[in-house]
Image: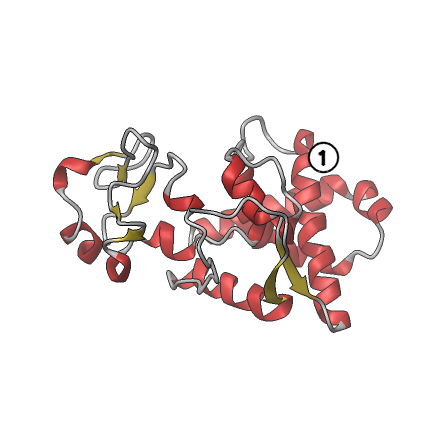
Amino acid sequence: MCKTDNSKIPAGRFGRWLKEIIKAAGSGGSMDVPCGECRACCTSSYFIHIRPDETETRAHIPRALLFPAPGLPRGHHVMGYNDKGHCPMFIDNACSIYAFRPLTCRIYDCRLFPATAVWEIENSKIKAQARRWRFELTTDEERKQWEALQRAAAFLNEQSACFPEAYLPARASRRAILALRIHEIFLKFDDDRDIRDHRREIAGEIMTLLSEHKTD
């Protein structure tokens, strides 16, 4: 279902990908990921979050497959997986509801892991696939964006003490998404030492930014 070789896969222009994933994450759009034969994310024992407003998606998933999402308000559900670890809607090596797949699936893109250099990935199949991606960095702007995104992810990992206890997500995939949301803060830094020297101020800026997003 997913090649296990180490051959490299073109991930596309980094700047274009960054704009697309930010737009998808913000507007509920979808990512066009060149998965090829890989089906790792469909077969990795994942619980898929289904939001209350995903009415078309819900209409195509048997009600018996949906369970209340722990820690979320009423109306949020998760869809589990079968005894093989496969999504129950994954049939004949393909998504049987692809046109109506959940938003979680639409915006999932394992290119986020090499983009953020977050490698503490829980699933070995996804980690192997993610390591094969290679972005094109052809402009100074793209290289600066690349560095800012990776610095954002590194900051979350290395400076967790600057945040309240349990404020940051524990899962690598969640931290990678968070790095995407805050990476612009790090565009103004050219030196890792400056980041360390201003870590308290940066943490405060991050928390302010996230608080503003919650009230949007």
Residue 174 visible to an observer of this rendering: no
Q: Which residue lies furthest to the bottom in this view?
A: 139
Along the viewing direction, whichever of 154 and 207 lies nearer the viewer = 154
Residue shown at the point (53%, 35%) measured from the top left: 124
Residue shown at the point (18%, 58%) measured from the top left: 56
Left or right: where 138 falls relative to 4 = right
Q: At which x and y percent is residue 178?
A: 55, 47
Along the viewing direction, whichever of 71 and 114 lies nearer the viewer = 114
Left or right: where 159 falls relative to 92 = right
Q: Residue furthest top?
A: 165
The amino acid beneath tag 1 is Glu
Residue 141 visible to an observer of this rendering: yes
Along the viewing direction, whichever of 49 and 5 lies nearer the viewer = 5
- Above/below status of 174 relative to 14: above
Residue shown at the point (51%, 43%) measured from the top left: 126
Along the viewing direction, whichever of 10 and 144 lies nearer the viewer = 10
Q: At which x and y percent is residue 34?
A: 48, 62
- Above/below status of 85 relative to 59: above
Q: At which x and y percent is residue 169?
A: 53, 35
- For label 1, the residue is 158
- Give the quadrant of residue 99: bottom left
